[in-house]
Image: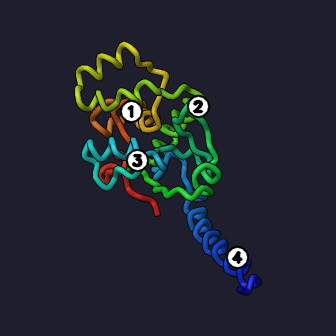
Amino acid sequence: MNYALRPTRYKLRATSYELRATSYELRAMNLKIGEVILVQTKKPAIERFQRQAGYGENSVWTHVCGSLGGLICIEGNFPRSRLIDFKKTYLEPGFNFKRLRRKGQTEKERYKVALWWATMNNLPYDAWQFFSMPLSYAFRNLGEALRRVFGSQMRFLCSQLIAEGFYQEGDYLFNKPAHLVVPADFCNPDLFEEVK
């Protein structure tokens, strides 16, 4: 076997990966303030829950974050909400993502939503709600009662954090409480347009 060919073959694979990463990077570098980013992470429990709730193909989008411009985003994640570098957190590991912009929203309104997101940095993740959300869908009254007893207004899931930004600006786009919003809710062509 000729070992001299091996490094060349591996180098070609690295180059094709770099090209793919570069095209994703170009899309991500143009993130605008107030855009919503859906990410296809490896969270099978969330995907399964969304499929059972009837979201079909959109169930693959298991995480959502909000753009604060450039590659800086905010996300609700365990253990606390935080600012992230989108490139390091999702691009370099190779996660698929989708950029969305609220239909009919002005630039000023997008800035106001993003400003609210930014003020919610470093809040605890609502682990209790993550585990009780299936109860809220199955038994609405029981889920709401448990949320009133154990819930908190200052703890957020990823999708709740992003939805709450819109709600705080008077845009009740999902017609349900923010704590019941899941990432797949954002993949609605009537509410959001995909930015390519």
Q: What residue is rendered at 45% in x and 45% in y?
A: 43
- Residue labelled with disc 4: 11
**Which sits earlier in the primary sequence, circle 3 or circle 2?**
3
Q: What residue is rendered at 60% in x and 58% in y?
A: 29
- Residue labelled with disc 1: 167
- Residue labelled with disc 3: 105
- Residue 121, label in figure: 2
Q: Quadrant of residue 175?
A: top left
- Residue 129, label in figure: none
Please name the amino acid that badge 1 sits on: Tyr
Q: How crowded is mark 4: few (under 14 residues within 10 Å), some or many (20 or more)?
A: few
Which one is in front in this view, the residue at disc 3 or the one at disc 1? 1
**Quadrant assignment for the N terminus:** bottom right
Q: Are marks 4 and 3 in contact (CB under 8 Å)?
A: no
Q: Which residue lies furthest to the top in this view?
A: 149
Q: Distance between the residues labelled 4 and 3?
A: 45 Å
Q: In which quarter of the image is residue 124?
A: top right
Q: How crowded is mark 3: few (under 14 residues within 10 Å), some or many (20 or more)?
A: few
Please name the amino acid that badge 2 sits on: Asn
Q: Which residue lies furthest to the right in this view?
A: 4
Q: What residue is rendered at 62% in x and 51% in y?
A: 71
Q: Distance between the residues labelled 1 and 2?
A: 17 Å
Choose between 48 and 147: the one closer to the eye: 48
